[in-house]
Image: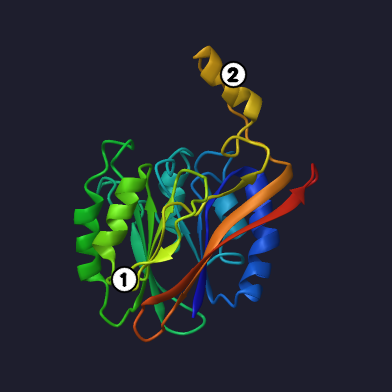
Amino acid sequence: MNFLFIGDVVGKGGRSAVKSLAPELRREFNCQFCVVNVENIANGGGMNAKTLNQLLPDYADVATSGDHVWDQKALETEIHGFDNVLRPANMGENQPGRGYGVFRNAGGGDIAVVNLMGQVFMRPSARCPFEKVREILSAIPKNVKCILVDFHAEATSEKAAMARFLDGRVTAVLGTHTHVQTADATILPGGTAFISDVGMVGAERSVLGRCPDSVVDKFVSGMPRRLPVVEKGDIRLDAVVVSYNHNTGKATAIQPISRTISVGLAQ
């Protein structure tokens, strides 16, 4: 069986690309299930009910997030209306929402999706993701064979360590956050698929989805700058397709994907 995982979606242009390309990719690669990281879908920072409803459930089955999950104030209450929207499980326990769930796969069986956030170069309030995922795995029913982990982290070393820590215990450890698709997709010895970063859904002519001139000016001047999202032009969708054994949950293949569409002013 196969599932599709789509990298960090940035702004309106990113949402348009998901709506245009996700159905096509699901058909092409025979993906029964789709997960998308949505922490930047609302104006490039955070998410809210309006933007989530544009992608769920028509274009993706589950949405994951990361360190920008609360950038949109409304989500603090709106998240309770979504059973299929996750925030990092190792955030503070008093924060709303949940960090993992077991979801029905239309192709058969259940899929557990776990959302974690790294600690290296990230928010210091996050508790140890290694300890947290150990707790979560002990709580997932034994009959759930496919387990997907979105590890939203900065350091490639931390991501690779998490993949090795979970090798043979989960189907895939898929890195998000850096918005750059890495060239290290592999199947580890225990049958876990891994990639350091899936990439993003954002403008080709940008710096991680933001206006290049503004980002360059911020670095050169050293001053705070507004960093507008590039919402039109060529929008690239980065994703991976993971194939796995339905009976064991072991991954058999991981295929990185990048597709581009043109998004105009009217979209």
In the depicted view, which residue is nearer to us: 204 or 88?
Answer: 204
Give me the C-alpha separation between circle 2 and circle 1.
45 Å
Is label 1 in a helix, a strand or a loop?
loop
Is disc 1 surrounded by few (<14), some (14 to 19) or many (20+) residues within 10 Å? few
Residue 12 in percent (x, y) is at 65, 45
**Which numbered dot is residue 80?**
none
Q: Residue at x 22, y 48 (%)?
A: 128
In the depicted view, which residue is nearer to us: 135 or 182?
Answer: 182
In the displayed structure image, the side of residue 126 where residue 231 appears, left or right:
right
Colouring mode (rainbow / by chain / secondary structure / one colour)? rainbow
Is label 2 in a helix, a strand or a loop?
helix
Q: Which residue is drawn at 54% across and 77% down?
A: 32
Residue 59 visible in the displayed image = yes
**Is residue 66 positioned above or below 215 on the image?**
below
On the image, which quarter does residue 70 sit in?
Answer: top left
Residue 40 in percent (x, y) is at 53, 44
**Is residue 31 positioned above or below 67 on the image?**
below
In the displayed structure image, the side of residue 82 where residue 266 appears, left or right:
right
Residue 92 in percent (x, y) is at 26, 45
Mark found first going from the N terminus, 2 or 1: 1
Please state which amino acid type lies under the numbered disc 2.
Asp
Residue with the mark numbered 2: 217
**Is residue 50 positioned above or below 122 on the image?**
below
Is disc 2 surrounded by few (<14), some (14 to 19) or many (20+) residues within 10 Å? some
Residue 29 in percent (x, y) is at 60, 74
Q: Nearer the viewer, mark 2 or mark 1?
A: 1
Q: Residue at x 64, y 68 (%)?
A: 25
In the displayed structure image, the side of residue 253 where residue 52 appears, left or right:
right
On the image, which quarter does residue 80 sit in?
Answer: bottom left
Please state which amino acid type lies under the numbered disc 1.
Pro
Residue with the mark numbered 1: 189
Residue 117 visible in the displayed image = no
